[in-house]
Image: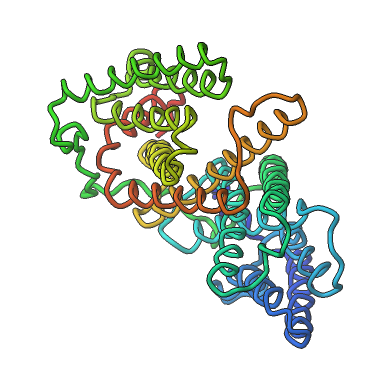
Amino acid sequence: MEYTDDLGGMLSETGPNAIVGWLLVGVLCLTVVVTVLQGAFDWAFIAVFVVAIVLLPALAFHDPLVMPPWELVVIAAVPVLWQGLLGHAFLTDVATYLAVAAVALLIAVELHQFTAVRMNHGVAIVLVVLTTLAVAGVWNVLQWLADVVLGTSLLLDGRSQNAINASVMIEFIYAGVAGIGGGIVFDLYFRTRDRSPTERTYVPPKPLPDDHKEPKSVKLRDRLGIPPHRQRQASRAMQFVLVGVFLFGLYARDLPTIANAAVALAITFVPAILEREYDLPMDAGLVLWITAAVFLHALGSAGLYDAVDPWDHLTHALSASVVAAAGYAFFRALHVHTDHVYLPPKVMAVFILIFVLAAGVVWEILEFVIDQSAMVLGLEAILAQHGIDDTIVDLIFNVVGAVIVTLWGTAYLTDVSDSLSERLESRFKTE
């Protein structure tokens, strides 16, 4: 019998693959011993983590032949061996984050194999790219927190705020290159290798059970305590104010105000376009939510970011909540659309956090590129950064927005994700 399971086919039961895999495990274990003796406990921990990921299939199946593909293990192990064991540094962080991408793919395979989670290779590749970017953000946030709380100098090492921020932005760019590049390479790897799992490694699709209770659809407009027509009026009022901000920017010849007001005004019309062109339900509360996020950002760019310190944090949390909502709608649409994707609620929450963290890193890269380009061209930056503290606090407030949506906002997005699922169904005609 031939089985079809993209991720299940990633586990190999062949002797040559197992031999190479176990040799790599042995070298990684040696690395653990050496790094512990040298006091490099961070590399020791990373090596132990990689070993655990590699050995999990063999332990779970009680068979030393069942191992991940040796190619992925090599990619994951190279930075540990090169930097942890040999003490050499790479010229860039690309290799390190390519290893992160490989580990993310191995984790996706094992979540699919050993838990209730189900993923096809497309979702796994998306997760690899997002996780690589998110890890870059989390790693730098943790270093910054250690420096601020514990007095270490992991990130805040005496250089200027802008110099440290530039280094972190370059690291983010390398992470993006590694994540996207790794995603492309791994996708080709999926498509070219024999993906047929054995009877043991095959994981059947997981359709939603008959008694499965989907989240009850709740209209956000009904929870705001404001009549729907007042919510629509509030959205319209914000649009008129944005027009005023745009005209003020033209009068003052202030490029950041003009650009941010124009983009914000354009985004406020996106919900209506989605509803008209794609039949996505956009109730008044959702429209107000999106409009408020871009409205507050435009006001900040017009001067409130400099005048009111917490304004930047407020807009980042609110904007991140909109990004989290989009991430939830996307992942839940896939969850409902096909039996080959099943994401339990707790896993869905983790996916939303990863999605928002990755989006936050991309946004910081965008700000950095625009800021640096403006400096080179002698223009006033449309988006600007203000040092490493500002960047890290922005990322932290992004997480706050994601947590708010994860805990309290998903019920308001059920209709949107269901409509997305129906469109996927009609377009791809899959189960």
What is the x, y in percent for residue 358?
55, 46
Image height check: is 33 above or below 117? Answer: below
Residue name at image x 48 percent, y 54 percent: 396
What is the x, y in percent for residue 375?
73, 31
What is the x, y in percent for residue 220?
22, 35
Q: How is the image coloured?
A: rainbow
Residue name at image x 14 percent, y 31 percent: 226
Decide if residue 215 is on the left or right side of residue 381.
left
* 61 or 285: nearer the viewer: 285
Image height check: is 18 above or below 342? Answer: below
Decide if residue 85 is on the left or right side of residue 130.
right
Figure quadrant of residue 96:
bottom right
Residue 2 at least partly seen: no
Figure quadrant of residue 337:
top left
* 307 or 387: nearer the viewer: 307
Residue name at image x 73 percent, y 74 percent: 25
